[in-house]
Amino acid sequence: MGSVGDFVKVMSMPCKEHAAIISRLTSEPGAYSGGMRAGLWLHERVCTGCKAYHRQLTTLRRGFEAWAGAESVGMGAGNGRCPEGVVRRIRERVGRG
Amino acid sequence: MNEARAGQGGGSGKGGGGGSAPSVDAWVERHTDALWRYAMSRVRREDVAEELVQETFLAAIGSKEGFEQRSSDLTWLIGILRNKIADHFRRAYRGRGDAEGGGAGTAQADGDGADGVGADVFDRMFTSKGMWKKEQIALSKGSGIDFSDRPRFVEDLGACSEGVPKGLWEAFLMREAYGVESDEICKRLAITPTNLWSRIHRAKALLRECLAGKGWWSGNE
């Protein structure tokens, strides 16, 4: 009965609330009940915006995981240089190490 | 010194030359800028980035014999730094007031843009009735991107991350990239679960919006 209630509740929400649920689900897949996930799934069958948002956030997460684990230095790291004072301290400490 | 560091720009030269194991001095000269940029792009705090880069070099010294030169020395150092960054974010909160523990987040808990830039990014996607605005619907064509074939997507994502305010970024990064538990993040940042998820939702919405500005999601990518 709880699941049915959750299902109905989700189906009656505006898309703004669906978007928040989608965002949470892409971070924590187990965050909501089966009823809520079923309601969201059904809603996404008829709502282009929510369906796209879900796919975009899933893509964003996968892309972000790739970025966070990237071995490439250039990915969003900019072109800044390490300040001279920092380089000096690093050299001193590493030299001692 | 400047000349020695000039023109390295994230390059990934092999070793210190001659096929032998590179000297630590050579590593510092060659790769400090690249490691610094990598660390700063993730932790966004100079004192923490400095500490992490130092720790990386010290760890490299300790395991220099294990460097087999199958990859470039920079790639190897980045691998060490990446683990150091993950440790930094995952380090258990012990209620300390020093920069490593509480300072990592509490100082920015109520500032640094957490409640400023991006505060309305979520709201502005919707009408007053909570429905998607038309221009948002228009972004639905290209929602599925095979980013593994799209290094530019990951590159743009990294660039867009620089526009996410620090207060949002820290919460987002800990949760999304390093898998820190929500309760732990709330303790470290001294925020409520509701506030945590609000920050994460806003960070995602900002990244999505920025990527849209770079031409993603339009269906033409």
Image (tube, rainbow, N blue to C red):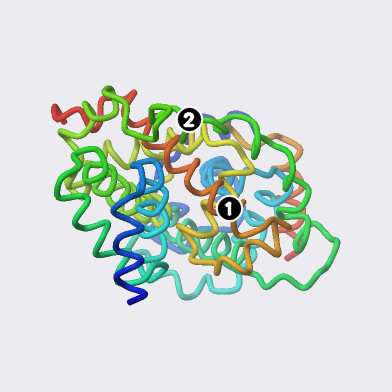
With B116 as the anchor, is B152 left or right in this view?
left
**For the point 36% across and 58% down, which residue is it?**
A9
Residue topped by disc 1:
B171
How many numbered markers are drawn?
2
Q: Are marks 1 and 2 on the same chain?
A: yes
Identify the image quadrant of the C terminus of chain A. bottom right
Q: Residues within 10 Å of mark 1 (few under 14, many from 20)?
A: many
**Observer-nearest of A85 and B126:** B126
Residue B193 coordinates in the image, percent (x, y): 60, 60
Q: What's the amino acid at mark 2? A: Gly
**Observer-nearest of B78 and B117:** B117
Residue topped by disc 2:
B7
Identify the image quadrant of the N terminus of chain A. bottom left
**For the point 57% across and 33% down, which residue is it?**
B119
The answer to whether marks 1 and 2 mark residues whose Cβ atoms lie closer than 8 Å is no
Q: Is residue B32 visible?
A: no
Q: Secondary structure at mark 1?
A: helix
Q: As displayed, is residue B155 above or below residue B90? A: above
Q: What's the amino acid at mark 1? A: Ala
**Observer-nearest of A34 and B60:** A34
**Observer-nearest of B80 and A22:** A22
Q: CA distance from mark 1 to mark 2?
A: 35 Å
**For the point 33% across and 34% down, which residue is it?**
B131
Marked residue chain, label 1: B
